[in-house]
Image (cartoon, helix red, strand yellow):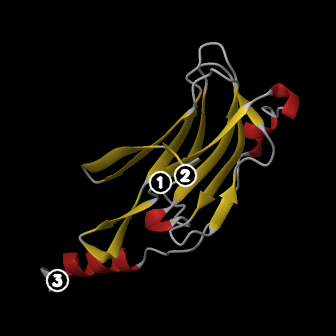
Amino acid sequence: MDKLLPLLLLLLTLGCSEQRPAEFEVDQENWSGRKASISAADSLLTGVTYLSSYSQIYVKSASRKFSLTGTISMRNVNPADTVYLQQATYYDTKGAVVRNYVNSPVYIAPMETVEIIINDDDTTGGTGDNFVFTWSKPPGAHDPFFEGVFISTYGQQGISFTTRGIPVQ
């Protein structure tokens, strides 16, 4: 019995982890102070960027998933020009919209980085989640740079990797 007690406790601990969907709200405060008015008279060039994201990855088999924290960085690499983000849409593995982070144009100042954080307990995106960004820039300015950094730890083990946005239009 003494040998079975640690195994029984381990099984009870693993079996008690409750998986319940959490409510995740967009931090509108992050975006509300960045609202920008842009018009056709501004002569801005528009682009679309796709970014693969990973809120979960498979571990050992297709039936076991590992959750990750994602930092989605939107970077203005221009030292003098402001760029504008018109849309930041988060999609799940099946291509359904999970949430929109930007509802009206916002600015990203020269050399500034703006971030979206996907918490490790937010598994609504699944294993094949992704973002699509629509943005504008002045003629001659560099495109904004989009990057995802994904990290998690379990015990003494950790995993981390990055993804980069690609132009789709």
Question: To which residue does mark 2 refer?
Answer: 118
Residue 37 placement (x, y as % from top left): 87, 32
**Label 3: few (<14), some (14–19) or many (≥20) C-alpha neighbours in 10 Å:** few
Residue 53, numbered label: 1
Q: What element carries label 2?
A: strand
Question: To which residue does mark 3 refer?
Answer: 4
Q: Residue at x 20, y 78 (%)?
A: 7
Q: Are marks 2 and 1 in contact (CB under 8 Å)?
A: yes
As shown in the figure, which amino acid type bears the numbered disc 1? Ser
Mark 2 vs mark 1: give the one in front.
Answer: 1
Residue sitting nearer the eye, 157 or 48? 48
Q: Quadrant of residue 77?
A: top right
- Is 111 displayed left or right of 33 in the figure? left
Q: What element carries label 3?
A: helix
Q: Is residue 47 depicted above or below 137 in this figure?
A: below
**One can see residue 134 in this view:** yes
Q: Is residue 54 depicted above or below 139 in this figure?
A: below
**Label 1: few (<14), some (14–19) or many (≥20) C-alpha neighbours in 10 Å:** many
Q: Which residue is drawn at 73% across and 47% down?
A: 102
Q: Which residue is drawn at 12% across and 80% down?
A: 3
